[in-house]
Amino acid sequence: MPSLRSRALSVALIAAGWRRRFASAEAVHARVAESARRPASHLPPRSLGRVAEVSRTFVGAWPVYDVAPRGAEPTARVLYVHGGGYIHELVRPHWAMIRTLVTQAQARVVVPAYILAPRGTADRTVPVAADLLSGLIESGGDGGTVLIGDSSGAGLALAAAQRLRDRTGAQPSRIVLISPWLDLTMSHPDQAALEADDPVLARPGLLEAGRLYAGTLAADDPQVSPLRGSFGGLAPLTVFTGTRDVLSPDSRELLRRARNAGAEVEFHEEPGLPHAYPLLPVPEGRAARDRIVELIRAAAEEE
């Protein structure tokens, strides 16, 4: 049973109208138009600078933040790919998670503020993300490299790992997928029944956001929907999902397909928890963050 705090937060998310962001194609286009007029900030909070060394570079048109422990050598490297339906920037819960990875796992965290849809489409975005991952793996130093993504960022992370595997065979030490958006066709038959109980997401807007991100590619192209890709030769996977998430059936499908392909999968499904719960200030979220920190520490020790 979900904790009292998580149940209260789900009620608050519904009351705050979070689902309205993806309630319709029109809502998505309104958000895209607003972002074009007044781009949202992806800057980290100033408080992060008190516990971490924060720098920014550019990879092409992408701002890329490098966040490292202040006064200590990092023990591992993390590429963190943020979510937001491919149309929303980095927000405070992302930076709070990044702060946890830096302060508790002593990791160096690389955070791309990738170009959002419709300017940023899968055919342009996945190759750059794969190159970033490759560069981080090849940078050497102590510890391993862990690839982490949440929501749409988890889908992008998985697509990047698949592309890197196909190009060079290289992989990070581990891939962590938080409430991943894996199939932009939104065609799993169990999703319709789940949608009414999801306090965060709605399919009409997700379908439109996915169409914008797909660009000229089909929605079922593996670059767009990595669930349609192959799972052999990937790094060990860890997946977090909740049963009040319309995307959770695809996480279960990933578990089935990946294990059938011989991949190692650690799977966490929390009953009654909403989308992206590991980023939320609830006991189950804290437990998930603690596990992610453990995985990064383990990757550091393996190298």
Image (tube, rainbow, N blue to C red):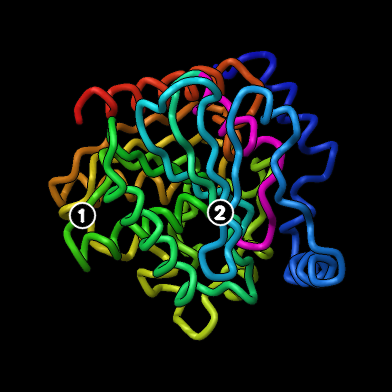
Q: Which amino acid does label 2 sit on?
A: Val
- Between 95 and 72, the one lying in front of the other is 72
Q: In which quarter of the image is residue 132?
A: bottom left
**Relative to 29, does residue 52 appear above or below in the rendering?**
above
- Please give the range of residues in magenta: 86-103
Q: Which residue is at a point 39% across and 69% down the rendered structure image? A: 127
For residue 170, which numbered disc appears in the image?
A: 1
In the rendered image, the residue lying farthest to the front is 71
For residue 70, which numbered disc appears in the image?
A: none
In the rendered image, the residue lying farthest to the bottom is 216
Marks 1 and 2: which is nearer the front?
Answer: 2
- How crowded pointer 1 is (Cα within 10 Å; few <14, some 14-19, many 20+) is rated as some
Q: Where is residue 159 in the image (x, y as percent from the top left)?
A: 37, 61
- Between 302 and 270, the one lying in front of the other is 302
Quadrant showing the N terminus = top right
List the residue tagged with mark 2.
Answer: 64
